[in-house]
Image (spheres, grey):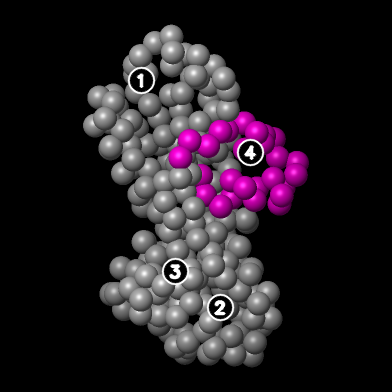
Amino acid sequence: MATVIRLLLFAIATGSFALDAVAQEYPARTIRIIVPYTPGGPTDIHARTVAQKLNEAWGQPVVVENRPGAAGMIGTEVAAGAAPDGYTLCTAGVTFSTAELLNPKMSFSPMRELAPIALLGAVPNILVVHPSLPVHSVKELIAFAKARPKELLYPTGGVGGAQSLAGAFFEYLSKTKMVPVQYRGSIPGITALVAGEVSVGFTDLITTLPHVEAGKLRLLAVTSGKARVIDAAGFRNVKR
């Protein structure tokens, strides 16, 4: 259950970018970073941090453009269709590598049409529940879910995303049945979780922890096996 959101930066896969960079000083104008997720999520936060540093280093504007939807594939397709001149970059998460496996008939191929530039970071997921749910541990959650199959709802940003995969894997390991509810990104899903529209969440640490600290969500476990994350949060790994 070591689910971690890995954030990558991609450019259009073509040799013309390298040739253009040699022919002229790069960058000579505004660079666009497409974030295929909603504002405020971990991918968006990483992208804006990188954009600011690139702006300072290059002296050219670096603009972040959010294009959420379809678990990140709408924005990714926009990036893949942009001019291959190095002025359109794109961030990516889990769905970049899972999309074609889940949907072989996609209109484009992320793996072939975009080339990786750098790993921006990795964010662990955490397992949380709404305070109204009478469970205080993973063991209690499993027992509750088994007693009420298909009654518990959890938010996802789309099929194949980190939340979707974490939820499905949890169901498989625990032999439970819960219901995924799709939202237009992780932030709307977390908002729904805080509001009590859904009861269980496999969400990222960065954007969810403030709600835990405010008492609006209850943290049960961290899905990463990294000791420093577990120690910082004070909770055990889900697998354990």
Say above or below: 14 vs 133: above
**Do the CB atoms of the residues marked 4 and 1 lie less than 8 Å apart?**
no
Q: Quadrant of residue 165?
A: bottom right
Image location (x, y in percent) of residue 167: 59, 69
Q: Is residue 192 left or right of residue 212?
A: right
Q: Which residue is mark 3?
A: 226
Q: Amino acid at mark 4?
A: Met
Comparing 32 with 149, the one in front is 32
Q: Amino acid at mark 2?
A: Lys
Give the farthest residue toward the right: 105
Comparing 40 with 224, the one in front is 224
In primary-sequence order, the first of circles 1 and 3 is 1
Q: Secondary structure at mark 2?
A: loop
**Do the CB atoms of the residues marked 1 and 3 lie less than 8 Å apart?**
no
> Residue at horizontal 69%, vertical 81%?
175
Specify the segment rendered in magenta: 92-118
Comparing 189 with 89, the one in front is 89
What whole-number distance in Å separates the C-alpha atoms at marks 1 and 2? 46 Å
Q: Residues within 10 Å of mark 3 (few under 14, many from 20)?
A: few
Say above or below: 39 vs 206: above
Q: Which mark is residue 239?
A: 2
**Do the CB atoms of the residues marked 2 and 3 lie less than 8 Å apart?**
no
Q: Secondary structure at mark 3?
A: loop
Work out whether residue 149 can be spotted: yes
Q: Secondary structure at mark 1?
A: loop
Say above or below: 185 vs 143: above
Q: How many marks?
A: 4
In primary-sequence order, the first of circles 2 and 3 is 3
